[in-house]
Image (tube, helix red, strand yellow):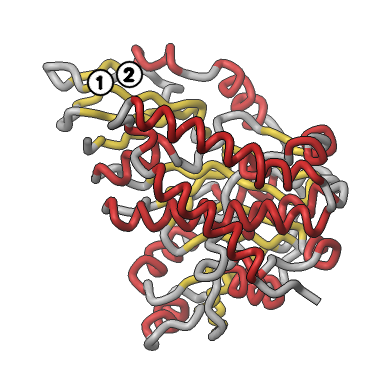
Amino acid sequence: MRLIDLDVELADPDGTLAIDRPGWRATLWWRERPIGHVEGATPPDGLIEIRDLLAHTDSAALAEARQRAAETPPAPVSLSVVVCTRDRPTELARCLDSLRRQTRPADEIVVVDNGSADARTREAAEAHGARYVREDRVGLDIARNRGARTATGAIVAYTDDDVIADMRWLERLVAAFDSPAIAVVTGLVLPAELDTEAQAHFETYWGFGRGYRRIDFGTDFFAQDSLTGAPVWQIGTGANMAFRREVFQTVGLFDERLCHGAAGCSGDTEFWHRVLRGGGTCRYEPGAVVRHFHRRDMAALSRQIHSYMRGHAAALLIQYERSGNRGNLRRALAHMPLLYARRLAGHLRHRGARHDRFLWQEIGGYVSGLLYYLRAPRPR
């Protein structure tokens, strides 16, 4: 079902929303900070009182938003933004346009062109004042690594070409590095549109949102890695992440075995795993917002989910390879197969469950990722 995607400011709750679609989803804000979301069916008259949405706010997130608004701005620090792209000049231009409207502008924007077929990517980058770098070896983590080597800022932020950055995105990312212990910051990813069934399905069951409260992932979180594998995917997503520059010297670069086209993805989560293993802290900051354009059709979403699970399986084995923590091996070879066996049994009993719509793609991707890791050459 197509949904209308709304932003609702609750600092002044007077007013009415007029909705012209059967369903709706509203992100709730307090003075430009997200504090919750709600969705539902449109009433017969198509009108919703904004005041009625107050009950759906996260009270702790609201209190946190008020506290964050009163904090002192951080000391100045140099900042680079890396955007990896390939053959999507229109999307790239849209992303770069949002980066030019930031309340805290980047000191440099690096566009890594990962093998585009023509000059339009270079033209879009240069038209928006970005630094253009060509990387002909295709792979997202290969491109990310080229960006890490090229960027000069003390903080290096990454986003994708299929996002629009909220105007306070960089301001909030930088502010979250308020302690030397914070090595990584991720932010909230909201849907840019929910115009198709595929987009609505992804946001409901696979969305990138990690909630509306700040979370620090440190030694306590990582302690479970030796038992069941630390769920590092809870930290965020690669479309909205930033690093202290020295992290790349400390833990290395992204593992290129996890590139799209190789394992599939999860280069970001495997990198966070290494940061945590080294004693660093990863912080999720929901005030740093970007909006992602999800896949518009079911065929593309199906391929994406297969790729996600392929990368996830390979990443678990790479994490075990690097750390020796058997929890990753248990999750890869015991917990996940058992989970899929249970889900498959339930799916066969109750056909048509929406959350299992891509179950076969998940299973196929997961098995493919395990086999990929066994065949892939080990780093020297």
Give the total of numbered labels: 2
Residue position for label 2: 50
Residue 201 image position (x, y, % from top left): 33, 39
Check residue 16 in the rendering and tell me which mark sits there, or answer none: 1
Residue 184 in percent (x, y) is at 72, 50
Q: Residues within 10 Å of mark 1 (few under 14, many from 20)?
A: few
Label 2 environment density (alpha carbons within 10 Å; few <14, some 14–19, many ≥20): some
Residue 132, above or below 71: below
Drawn side of residue 209 relative to residue 24, left or right: right
Q: Residue at x 83, y 67 (%)?
A: 249
Closer to us: 71 or 195:
195
**In the drawing, does residue 199 fall left or right of residue 314?**
left
Frontmost residue, 198 versus 86: 198
Determine contact: label 2, label 1, CB under 8 Å: yes
Image quarter of the N terminus = top left
- Asked which secondary structure carries label 1, the reply is strand
- Of callouts 2 and 1, the N-terminal one: 1
Tell me which amino acid carries mark 1: Thr
161 to the left or right of 273: left
Look at 42% across and 22% down and name the residue there.
10
Residue 76 in the image: state x and y as whole percent: 74, 55
In the foreground, 284 or 252? 252
Tell me if residue 357 comes above or below residue 167 in the rendering: above
Res 117 → quadrant: bottom left
- Is 11 positioned to the left or the right of 353 in the image? right
**x, y percentage for residue 376?**
65, 71
Q: Is 275 located above or below residue 151 in the figure?
A: above
Q: Tag 2, which secondary structure?
A: helix
